Amino acid sequence: MVVLNKIYTRTGDKGTTGLATGERVEKWSLRVESYGAVDETNAAIGVARLHGSADTVLDAMLGRIQNDLFDLGADLATPERDKPLGWEPLRIVAAQVTRLETEIDQMNAAIPPLNSFILPGGSALAAYLHVARTVCRRAERLIAELMAQPNEKVSPEALAYANRLSDFLFVAARRANDNGAADVLWVPGANR
């Protein structure tokens, strides 16, 4: 259970922050950058949801994803260590990745295949979902870089979730563009 009765603590005034394990790390550490980008993804999805209230099915999916992103942030903020924590850390699980795959397939079934890359745009909801997608891709790159560090452990499901979420957001943007009918297609070399 999370209890936030005091918002400022002054503990970060010297450039460090606390992980869920209690250890202090620099605010610019790769782990903090990773879960910070996850938090940014969540905020971008929140803004996107302001523009999609008519699509209640998509809005419900996005709401579940926002909750999952807090799970992902908690996962990344709780590094695995050799000594036991004394409590069970929250981790992304395969079922959360599978749910994204199922929802991607369900949405994509109604959308014609692409014959060109698309430009972020079309409807407001689609444009904001593309912003969320690009922020999510950054989070994914940072998580992958964190995984590659010799002294860091990240669950494969955490990276898979971020990877699948960026795919989900791409397909969701196409759904928001009248199932691709309002997609703005890239025309290579059009302005030469």
Image (tube, grey):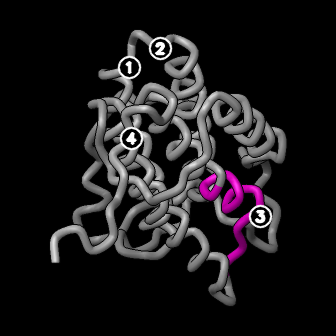
How crowded pointer 4 is (Cα within 10 Å; few <14, some 14-19, many 20+) is rated as many
Query: What's the amino acid at mark 2?
Result: Asp
Mark 2 element type? loop
Work out which quarter of the rendered image holds the C terminus and state it. bottom left
Mark identifier at residue 183: 4
Contact check, label 4 and label 2, Cβ < 8 Å: no
Per the model, the C-alpha gap separating discs 2 and 3 is: 32 Å
Distance from label 4 to label 2 (Cα)?
17 Å
Residue 52: which numbered mark, if any? Answer: 1
Figure check: 135 above or below 44: below
Give residue 187's position: percent from left, percent from top: 32, 62
Disc 2 marks which residue? 55
Q: Earlier in the sequence, mark 4 or mark 3?
A: 3
Q: Decide: is 165 above or below 14.
A: above
Which residue is at a point 40% across and 53% down the rendered structure image?
Answer: 118
**Residue placed at 66% from the left, 65% from the top?**
79
In contact (CB < 8 Å): disc 2 and disc 3: no
